[in-house]
Image (cartoon, rainbow, N blue to C red):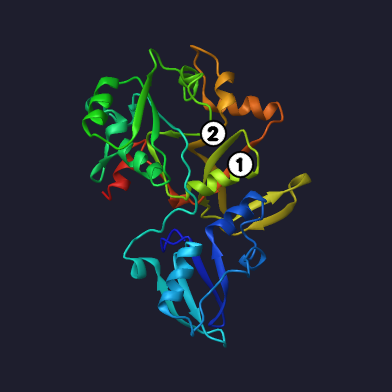
Amino acid sequence: MDDVGNKLLIVVEDGLYLGLISIGDIQRAIIRNVDLNESISTIMRNDYVVSKTTDSIEDIKELMLRIRSEFMPVVDSSGNIVKIHFWEELFNSKESKPLKDFKLPVIIMAGGFGTRLRPLTHVIPKPLIPIGKKTMLEEIFDRFGKYGCDEFHISVNYKADLIKYYIESQKLPYNVSYFEEDKPMGTAGSLSLLKDKIDSTFFVSNCDILIDQDYSEILEYHKQNRNEITIVAALKHYPIAYGTIETGEDGLLEDITEKPELTFKINSGMYILEPHLIDEIPTDDFFHITHLIENLRLQGRKVGVFPISQNSWTDIGTWDEYMQVLGK
């Protein structure tokens, strides 16, 4: 899916159509701890709708609009794929509308010094670093704006005046407010400044990450699972170039695996929180969001993890990562 840039894939067997598998199918399987080495046949759904050769273009467009499908295969009675209609071809648009709109507050943590991006951040604060024709902050605004979000709270400290001046000069169609740390307070300490100002479920995002995922699906998982916090986690794959060995008592061989690939869930820097948690953040104290997460975990409260693919997470926190985003 990362390689071809689609969140939906066609599954074939012996050249004939077998089914479709979506990013959501894979994410739900990962949440259920299904082993990534399992065959996709164990998680593939057989209830996806496809078009028949008798369907008109208007019928196909109506179906794609209704189910928000990236593409629609046309399959004949023998299982042959006759044609594939892509959203961008039928609707002259590169992306479909999100499955569900929502209008929730978004908090962007933009108070850091950006030390790993020096000397650039000596001049430009990290939230204003350009990504294409936009700054990071504007890109984050617009990604949430697609879902109807227009309320943004930005935690600022380093070069706060420059951030405010730039954003206010752009006349963006969003309600943007700022809450300022007078000292470094960690990745969550400054949220205490929002007590009595947030009364609904809200998103938190670092200012140096971008997530390519339907945010409404993350929110749906958060709500259905009744989580107090949901962490968005990117899967990172690390291939081992050698055979690995496991031994038991007296050094006897138990298993040998040739060139395995290790997969980890990495904290991406995006979260969904319930508003009462702001009251659990200490006032005027250094406090990371991981401290809050650990507190909840130790109390047996619900902290969920929503997985996304490796290439669905863009992190510009270091020079190497930023230059990779720029294609240099």
x, y (%) of residue 222?
59, 41
Residue at the spot 39% in from the left edge and 66% down from the top edge: 87
Label 2 crowding class (10 Å Cα cut-off): few <14, some 14-19, many 20+? some
x, y (%) of residue 275?
56, 27
Residue at the spot 53% in from the left edge and 58% down from the top edge: 23
Q: Distance between the residues labelled 1 and 2?
A: 9 Å
Amino acid type, residue under disc 1 in the picture:
Lys
Classify residue 133 as left or right of residue 233.
left
Frontmost residue, 245 versus 288 = 288
Classify residue 257 as left or right of residue 160.
right
Q: Is residue 260 visible?
A: no
Label 1 crowding class (10 Å Cα cut-off): few <14, some 14-19, many 20+? some
Q: Quadrant of residue 142?
A: top left
Instruction: Kindly identify which numbered label has been placed on residue 39.
Output: none
Instruction: Kindly identify which numbered label has been placed on residue 201.
Output: 2
Instruction: Kindly identify which numbered label has been placed on residue 223.
Output: 1
Classify residue 53 as left or right of residue 154.
right
Frontmost residue, 41 versus 241 = 41
Dot 1 and dot 2 residues touching (CB under 8 Å): yes
Q: In which quarter of the image is residue 180?
A: top left
Amino acid type, residue under disc 2 in the picture:
Thr
299 vs 27: above or below: above
286 vs 117: above or below: above
